[in-house]
Image (cartoon, grey):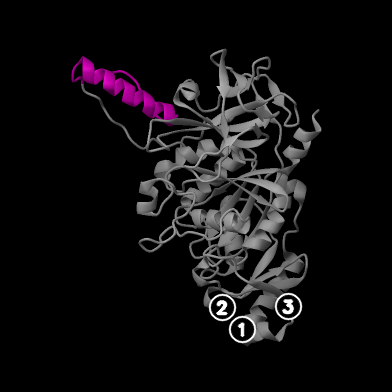
């Protein structure tokens, strides 16, 4: 076993952010990049004309409509860890992209809107994570708005999703009176000061729960409610169990506001330790050890036309084992053929590709239309002398989750147009495995 590989694997954390539309996934993604120092100022999903745009929403349509249409894959460093982040679409129309992307994640952050609670798309995505054994950390967002009581939100998560919750911190106030969070392990309050526009990290400081400034900021009634809730959690709350968390049987819960940057740093400080490092992957030929010296990876997403200046096709690959070096010759398992001179690129900033000389466990991109034309979702690429068969992704989803969105018919318009139609429909099915074509 190569010591470099073992060390690099231990540093990797690959996670997806899931939620119902408009719960704040892309805003949270932007602020995590800000926390990690990957960007200096955070953009806004629905900013003013000419304002700073978000990093992960790179399509023109995404920026026009203020929604995520395609999964964005991003990387940043934090506390000595390499964080691979997957910002997934929330809208049901684009959910197939999310379902496939979750195959590449080792854990997930489930975002809950404090005003609306658990919503339909969140339930579906949670079911997919549970099917795949993905550990889930919960972040209750938008605490800067007047929402539902935190105890009521915890009760709804446990009843609707069927997973016990273990709060790691607790909100001090809500709405305009959201002052900070109480760290249950350290038994101290982390106070925040609002940053202008939420573009930079919020200044913070710590104080004791008995600090007079809290009573003054919350008012007598609000302060007593917070003390009562914290005491209740200590007496009757679900204790955190790391083994249950990794088994997907318990979810640690954090509170905060991505828009105002409240509660993000304490969340990220804990999450880098909570999130699991890369796990063995199952293939049709057996288990793949992430510490193995043999390079292997599987395709979890295909994206075309990322560069408006020329035709392109990019295969997003989850590296499962070994080390990639530039120009490596890999084996395409299904076709039994070799792909020579493979180039990998990093995943920071959706349209900007930086070529890598070396890549370890995590996420990368194989670019070039000719090289990626034979690749499909779920297929392995590996060293030419090492075959892993096909990845087991549990891609067959329950009928209520895998919904058909569009049905259409094609009419014969002549041989030339038929060829164009065949080419177009083949590209469509190439990018979306939920679409099935059949002849009438």
Q: What is the x, y in percent for residue 384?
A: 64, 16
> Going by the image, does 223 lie left or right of 124?
right
Q: Are marks 1 and 2 in contact (CB under 8 Å)?
A: yes
Mark 3 residue element: loop
> Does the magenta segment cover residue 423?
yes
Q: Which residue is mark 3?
A: 209
Q: Which residue is mark 2?
A: 177
> Does the magenta segment cover residue 365?
no
Q: Residue at x 47, y 51 (%)?
A: 120
Confirm whether residue 324 shows in the render. yes
Q: Residue at x 71, y 73 (%)?
A: 189
Against 261, residue 411 (above or below) is above
Q: Which residues are magenta?
A: 412-440
Q: Residues within 10 Å of mark 2 (few under 14, many from 20)?
A: some
> Going by the image, does 394 lie left or right of 55?
right
Q: Residue at x 42, y 42 (%)?
A: 94
Against 305, residue 339 (above or below) is above
Of 104 and 292, the residue lying toward us: 292
């Amino acid at each position: 076993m190569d010591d470099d590989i073992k060390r690099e694997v231990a540093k990797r954390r690959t996670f997806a952010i899931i939620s119902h539309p408009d719960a704040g996934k892309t805003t949270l993604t932007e602020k995590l990049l800000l926390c990690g120092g990957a960007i200096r100022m955070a953009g806004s999903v629905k900013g003013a004309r000419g304002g700073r745009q978000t990093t992960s929403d790179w399509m023109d349509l995404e920026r026009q409509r203020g929604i995520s249409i395609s999964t964005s894959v991003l990387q940043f460093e934090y506390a000595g860890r390499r964080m691979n982040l997957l910002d997934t679409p929330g809208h049901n129309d684009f959910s197939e992209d999310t379902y496939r992307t979750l195959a590449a994640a080792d854990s997930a952050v489930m975002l809950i809107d404090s005003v609306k609670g658990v919503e339909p798309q969140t339930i579906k995505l949670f079911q997919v994570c549970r099917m795949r054994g993905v550990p889930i950390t919960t972040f209750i967002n938008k605490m800067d708005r007047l929402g539902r009581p935190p105890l009521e939100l915890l009760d709804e998560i446990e009843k609707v999703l069927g997973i016990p919750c273990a709060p790691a911190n607790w909100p001090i106030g809500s709405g305009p009176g959201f002052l900070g969070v109480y760290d249950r392990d350290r038994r101290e309050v982390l106070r925040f000061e609002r940053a202008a526009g939420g573009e930079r990290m919020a200044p913070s400081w710590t104080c004791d729960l008995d600090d007079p400034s809290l009573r003054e900021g919350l008012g007598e009634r609000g302060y007593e409610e917070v003390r009562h809730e914290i005491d209740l959690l200590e007496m009757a709350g679900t204790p955190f169990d790391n083994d249950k968390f990794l088994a997907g049987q318990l979810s640690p819960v954090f509170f905060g506001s991505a828009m105002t940057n409240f509660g993000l740093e304490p969340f990220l400080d804990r999450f880098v330790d909570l999130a699991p490092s890369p796990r063995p992957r199952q293939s049709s030929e057996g288990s793949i050890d992430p510490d193995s010296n043999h390079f292997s990876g599987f395709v979890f997403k295909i994206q075309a036309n990322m560069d408006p200046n020329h035709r392109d096709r990019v295969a997003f690959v989850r590296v499962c084992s070994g080390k990639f070096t530039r120009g490596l010759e890999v084996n395409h398992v299904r076709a039994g053929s070799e792909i020579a001179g493979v180039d990998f690129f990093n995943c920071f900033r959706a349209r900007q590709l930086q070529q890598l000389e070396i890549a370890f466990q995590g996420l990368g991109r194989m670019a070039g239309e000719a090289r990626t034309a034979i690749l499909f979702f779920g297929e392995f690429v590996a060293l030419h002398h090492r075959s892993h068969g096909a990845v087991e992704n549990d891609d067959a989803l329950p009928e209520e989750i895998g919904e058909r969105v569009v049905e259409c018919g094609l009419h014969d318009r002549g041989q030339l147009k038929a060829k164009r139609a065949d080419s177009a429909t083949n590209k469509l099915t190439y990018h979306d495995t939920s679409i099935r074509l059949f002849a009438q």
